[in-house]
Amino acid sequence: MKFDTPATTNPIDQMKVIGKPVDRIEGVLKTTGTAPYAYERHEVASNQAYGFVVGAAIAKGRIRSMELEAAKRAPGVIAIVTAQSAGELAKGQYNTVKLLGGPQVDHYHQAVALVVAETFEQARAAGAMVRIEYDRMDGAFDLAKAKDSATKPPRISAGPPDSAVGDFAAAYAAAPVTLDATYTTPDQTHAMMEPHATLATWNGDELTVWTSTQMVDWARSDLARTLGMPKTKVRVISPFIGGGFGVKLYLRADALLAALGARAARRPVKVALHRALITNNTTHRPATIQRVRIGATREGKITAIGHESWSGDQPQGKADGAVHQTRMLYAGDNRMTATRIAVLDLPEGNAMRAPGEATGHMALEAAMDEMAEKLGIDPVDFRIRNDSQVVPDRAIAPTAENSQAQKPEAATGDVKPAGHPFSQRQLVECLQIGADRFGWAKRSARPGQVRDGRWLVGMGVASAYRGAPVTKSAARVRLERSGRIVVETDMTDIGTGSYTIIAQTAAEMMGVPLAGVFVRLGDSNFPVSAGSGGQWGAASSTAGVYAACMKLREAIVQQLGLDVADASFSDGKVTSRGKSVPLSEAAAQGELVAEDLIEFGDLARKSQQSTFGAHFVEVGVDRFTAEIRIRRMLAVCAAGRILNPKSARSQVIGAMTMGVGGAIMEELAIDKRLGFFVNHDLASYEVPVHADILSQEVIFLDGPDPLSSPMKAKGIGELGLCGVSAAIANAIHNATGIRVRDYPLTLDKLI
Ligand code: MOS
């Protein structure tokens, strides 16, 4: 089904099942430990052996020699895979460097060997016996030092690296009130709960992997590409994923090495990347240096706004897209954004939890706060005064760039003319409702004034912006003889609730209760979906299910000899011209199957589809120790129709929690001499826990967006993070009067 005209009234609008805060349908499997994760697939292949990944001990250089004999003779060892023994391997489309290094080493902990043994302990013990001599080369590991050598990347995830409208320099120079501030954000790691893990087995020349991936089809195509085999010979199964956060968008070493290990051992092999390896072996969010300049009239009208961002990565790597929201959020006739990337020899940087906007808001929304203070205008009011109902950066193509942005094959470069409308933009409402509900009026405009015992108390606000990309997504729906509806798509559920909203979609469309739908996800034998990433998954994958259900409805009506135009589906029956027939009757002669996909045509390019929100935070800062406490958080989000308010709320709360991490805790410490992240486990990389945040609330401005998809919904997960860290930094400033521009705002920076 092609989506190229705005959605009109359709079966989804009944909202009998869609829009209801139902519990996750797979929740019981997870809470009872019976949802099978990749490393736990004991039942699917007998005789499983264990692989242990050996990571490079240098950041840059070459392997001079590898001594494997001792490891080979160690108890239980079955095989050892190295780049030398594995033969020619290609680089995956989505990988920056090779997943199995050697002799060249591109980064610390790049995989250089896999030891396969009868037990995990034997594999690990033998792994420690692999002796490698390196020729170490000097590398660049410090963004601040490499900044001046940075160059313009070909593009950032959401469009061109640079943009310019009007005459920024002149307008900034002429502005009566200006701000020029530079912010830094550190390298961060995803820290998802489930490590990367894969069980691989060969049947002749056919490979099956049970793995943990956000994107089944990308994993499948990159496995095939790397191994030099046809994609049709690779099957990827990933029904349950214990968190992704972007690090599981792309094929990683566990899957490739499990496949190579299984081939070498002639047995099924499972490989998990152990926790201390993940941070340096896989991807991370790169550090940024961001300069924001704002010029405004004394009345608080922005006349010039500029945002420059520097980040680093391996050669051929990606720049952080931190400038993106600055093209979208606020009015201003003269504007510029610029993105530069420096070559660093740290591990690969890549997408993590709202990549681009997550870091970008940390700078822009703190700068907006600083500017409001300079102007003597309330920061909520300052944002509202500079709202824009069209895309403010007229140099930027709207959704054509923004949608499907992270899928290289779908990227387009056509730049649209000025003033594109947003399909929906409720930033002002989010700010107003949030201010009202949060009790913003009680905030002291002057910092450092409010005390509660030993605590200095402050409030902060930030706007939230995130694109709402949509992408092609297919599904298959069956009506079984029993009347049960079965949905099959390779969509993933990374803890987000995909199973549930897909079941809700099918139940609504087919007029059956939620319990009458069975959902199968995460198998490359199923139709290719949008997958999970960039907050495109929910809206796109349910639209694909919608399309398949429309087809199944037609098939049912036809089978029963009813009139299509007049048919309605409810209570497990199809009714046409007063005649009601149970659905199961249509499948009496055999089940009915329909498959379709949603494709997004030009409509998606005619208006900018985005999500908006506002974050409000109250913090306490200990007067004596500078300990920071998050006392209250409120998010107000506008993201079209909310498919399931319960799972959507969980998404936003999780994202807000990540924002707390970004504001006051998360930071990868770099050994700038040897070039690796030192705190590479969950003991030394700090993330927030429940006790760190006393109260979180979420309000949705629920309103269908007929331009987004037939579902009239948009993604929500990443919006919940954008702006949170800045709101906290702003609240800390309001509490203490201290402005810290280097994240995270740890207490040592406040003393
Ligand atoms: Mo997300 S960082 O696109 O998985």
Image (tube, helix red, strand yellow):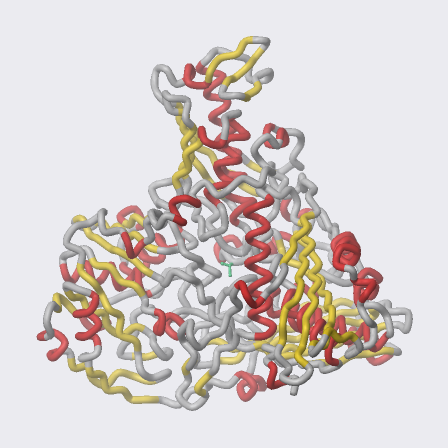
Q: Look at the picture and state if 671 lies above or below 636.
A: below
Q: Position of residue 392 (x, y in %)?
A: 75, 60
Residue 283 lies left or right of residue 178; in this view the side is left
Q: Is residue 435 left or right of residue 79?
A: right
649 or 236: which is nearer to us? 649
On the image, the x and y values in percent for residue 168 come to: 78, 74
Q: Residue furthest right?
A: 299
Observer-nearest residue: 354 or 94? 354
Residue 159 image point, x, y percent: 60, 62
Instruction: Where is residue 293? Give x, y as percent.
Output: 75, 76
Instruction: Check the image and report above or below for 374 versus 703.
Output: below
Q: Residue at x 80, y 72 (%)?
A: 304
Count of numbered badges drawn on the protein: 0
Quadrant in which residue 214 is drawn:
bottom left
Seen in the picture, residue 55 relative to 158 is either above or below; the reply is below
Q: Is residue 439 rendered to the left or right of residue 320?
A: right
Q: Judge from the rendering whether residue 746 lies leftward or rightward of residue 381; answer left or right.
A: left
Q: Is residue 317 visible?
A: no
640 or 610, nearer to the observer: 640
For the point 54% across and 9% down, which residue is it?
A: 579
